[in-house]
Image (tube, rainbow, N blue to C red):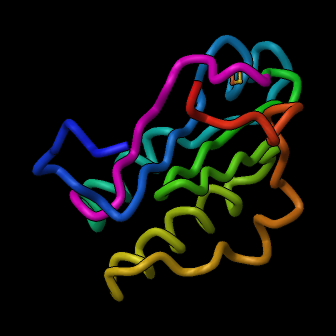
Amino acid sequence: MPVKNVTRRKTLGQVVVCMGCCCGRTDKGHPDVPVDWLKSEWRRTLPKSIHLTVSGCLGPCDASNVVLLLFGDNPVWLGGLTRFEHYQAIADWADASREIDSLLPLPAVLEPFRMERFHNLEVPLEV
Ligand code: FES
């Protein structure tokens, strides 16, 4: 199917950090999400290369502290991020990818947090 819409704001990818009804809500027992630090890091190094979005609920609240990494047709869902170092690894990965203008493999420290978001990945996208 031909692409109909075009943006001049193309990026290598997009990092969507959930801060909805559960993620980051320490008052509900969830680990903190260092949103201010992430925004500061992005302003400092990554404003146009990889887009940062702080979102409302992405859906899988039970995974707690969810991050969605969007690049091309290969979204990666992470859940259960508990430590500042996890978010730091995301920022470092994004910055290193920016430096070479190409996405690097995700850092090994993030691999245990990958999750399947959808229960039937065999469904064709075109209906
Ligand atoms: S609040 Fe993050 S997935 Fe619902």
- In front of the other: 60 or 41: 60
- In front of the other: 2 or 67: 2
Residue 56 locus on image (x, y percent) = 54, 18
Q: Is residue 15 above or below residue 107?
A: above
Which residue is located at x 16 percent, y 44 percent? 6
**Left or right: residue 80 compared with residue 9:** right
Query: Is residue 49 highlighted in magenta?
Result: yes
Residue 91 locus on image (x, y percent) = 50, 64
Which residue is located at x 69 percent, y 76 percent? 107
- In front of the other: 115 or 47: 115
Which residue is located at x 50 percent, y 39 percent? 35
Which residue is located at x 62 percent, y 56 percent? 87
If the image is split into quadrants, where does the C terminus sit? Answer: top right
**Left or right: residue 4 compared with residue 78:** left
**Range drawn in magenta:** 48-60
If the image is split into quadrants, where does the N terminus sit? Answer: top left
Query: Is residue 54 highlighted in magenta?
Result: yes
